Amino acid sequence: MARVPYVEREHLSKDHKKIFDRIAKTRGSVQNVFAALLNSPEAAEAVTSVGEYIRYKSNLDPIIRETAILTTAKELQNSYEWAQHEPVAREVGVREEVIDGILSGKGPMGLPPKEGLFIQAATELVRTATITKNTFQALDHLLGKQMTIDFLVTVAYYSMVARIISALEVDFDDWLNLNSKFNQSE
């Protein structure tokens, strides 16, 4: 059970209903993590704006984005985030070997260098709050400055969201697949 109530639209002021509506419009619904964040509507608005950029406006390749998100979820042991993004990762074309490599903790071992780099960079950032010079140079070489920044923002954003989910003990949304590989590996 979550540590805060899930805020419903009818419990918000007129101005705050607009925030709820924007979340629902961009994501198709107001998931539990955002309903929990709506206990502070302005914070929810700020957090969801960054997520909206990452998911719907950034030019970062969706395969790279979802690889980074799954790596972040695994590193932070966040089954909610994993369950949200495992199907998205498959949908955008993340290979099963990559998903399995992230889940097993083997990460980049045995994967092509490009795929392994994204796992390595996300792992380093989550574990140490930075990345090595060599990892940064490789990212910059492959992605360029703008997409390297978008990659780093993606990992940082999903790290923040994972920590919010854990701290608030956010419940799985009813539609989430509780039979994800993540839950089977625990």
Image (cartoon, rainbow, N blue to C red):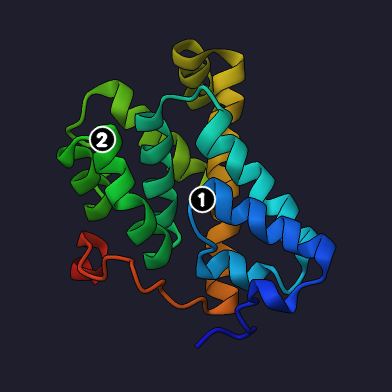
Relative height, residue 163 to residue 145 (above, below): below
Q: Residue at x 22, y 37 (%)?
A: 109
Left/right placement of residue 147 relative to residue 16 reads left
Element on which disc 2 rests: loop
Identify the amino acid type marked 1: Arg
Choose between 165 and 75: the one closer to the eye. Answer: 165
Q: Residue at x 59, y 75 (%)?
A: 167
The answer to whether the residue labelled 2 contacts the one labelled 1, judged by CB atoms less than 8 Å apart, is no
Identify the amino acid type marked 2: Val
Checking the image for residue 94, the label placed there is: 2
Return the residue at label 1: 27
Dot 1 alpha-carbon crowd within 10 angstroms: few under 14, some 14 to 19, many 20 or more: some
Can residue 62 be seen here? The reply is: yes
Relative height, residue 78 to residue 4 (above, below): above
Relative height, residue 120 to residue 169 (above, below): above
Element on which disc 1 rests: helix
Q: How far apart, in angstroms, are the residues tagged by discs 2 and 1?
A: 21 Å
Mark 2 and mark 1 lie on one chain; the one further toward the N terminus is 1
Can residue 77 be seen here? The reply is: no
The tally of labels here is 2
Q: Position of residue 182 (x, y in %)?
A: 26, 63
Q: Position of residue 4 (x, y in %)?
A: 64, 83
